[in-house]
Image (tube, rainbow, N blue to C red):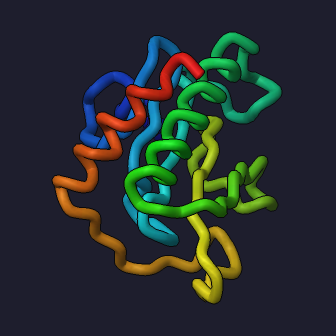
């Protein structure tokens, strides 16, 4: 089976990207738990964190930070879950290492990573998030 995240990295599949550097990409989750729910992936296929070279993890950290700051500034969230499902029994579905950024608010009703809500962000909001993420690429 072909890796869906590798297809995004290779630009063979569309994703609503928020941030990108030479070793990592962030984009909106296609089945979000909340407004701004994003994924951060390395541009290197690794099943899990332990298979990932350190320089890719550092690039992912930069992407995670820039994306989270963009979500804070544009969408107004201050609380987040940063999640990684490591392995099948932990709920990992796509076996390409990735981190979830899940914005949270009081009484949002979220319990697990698999509770989904239909969320749609406007193109204008997505563009703001993309531009704002660039402001934080060196922090």
Q: How many marks?
A: 0
Q: Position of residue 81 (x, y in %)?
A: 69, 60
Residue sitting at 38 percent across and 59 percent down? Answer: 30
69 w.r.t. 9: above or below:
below
Residue 1 vs residue 86, the one in the foreground? 86
Residue sitting at 45 percent across and 50 percent down? Answer: 73
Q: Position of residue 38 (x, y in %)?
A: 48, 51
Residue sitting at 69 percent across and 52 percent down? Answer: 82
Toward which corner of the image does residue 133 lie, by quadrant? top left
Q: Position of residue 116 (x, y in %)?
A: 49, 77
88 w.r.t. 10: above or below:
below
Toward which corner of the image does residue 78 lie, by quadrant? bottom right
88 w.r.t. 23: above or below:
below
Q: Among all residues in the image, which is located at the extreme left?
A: 123
Residue sitting at 76 percent across and 31 percent down? Answer: 49
Q: Position of residue 126 (x, y in %)?
A: 27, 50
Residue 107 vs residue 5, the one in the foreground? 107
Image quarter hosting the C terminus: top right
Toward which corner of the image does residue 14 lie, by quadrant? top left
Say left or right for 67 vs 109: left
């Amino acid at each position: 089976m072909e890796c869906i995240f590798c297809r995004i990295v290779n630009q063979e599949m569309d994703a609503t990207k928020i941030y990108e550097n030479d070793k990592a990409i962030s984009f909106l989750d296609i089945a979000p738990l909340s407004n701004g729910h994003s994924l951060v992936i390395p541009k290197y296929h690794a099943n899990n964190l332990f298979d990932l070279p350190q320089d890719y993890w550092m690039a992912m950290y930069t992407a995670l930070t820039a994306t989270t700051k963009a979500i804070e500034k544009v969408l107004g969230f201050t609380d987040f879950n940063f999640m990684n499902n490591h392995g099948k029994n932990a709920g990992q579905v796509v076996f390409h290492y990735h981190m979830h950024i899940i914005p949270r608010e009081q009484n949002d009703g979220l319990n697990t990573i698999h509770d989904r809500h239909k969320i749609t962000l406007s193109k204008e909001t997505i563009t703001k998030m993309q531009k704002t993420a660039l402001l934080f690429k060196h922090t």
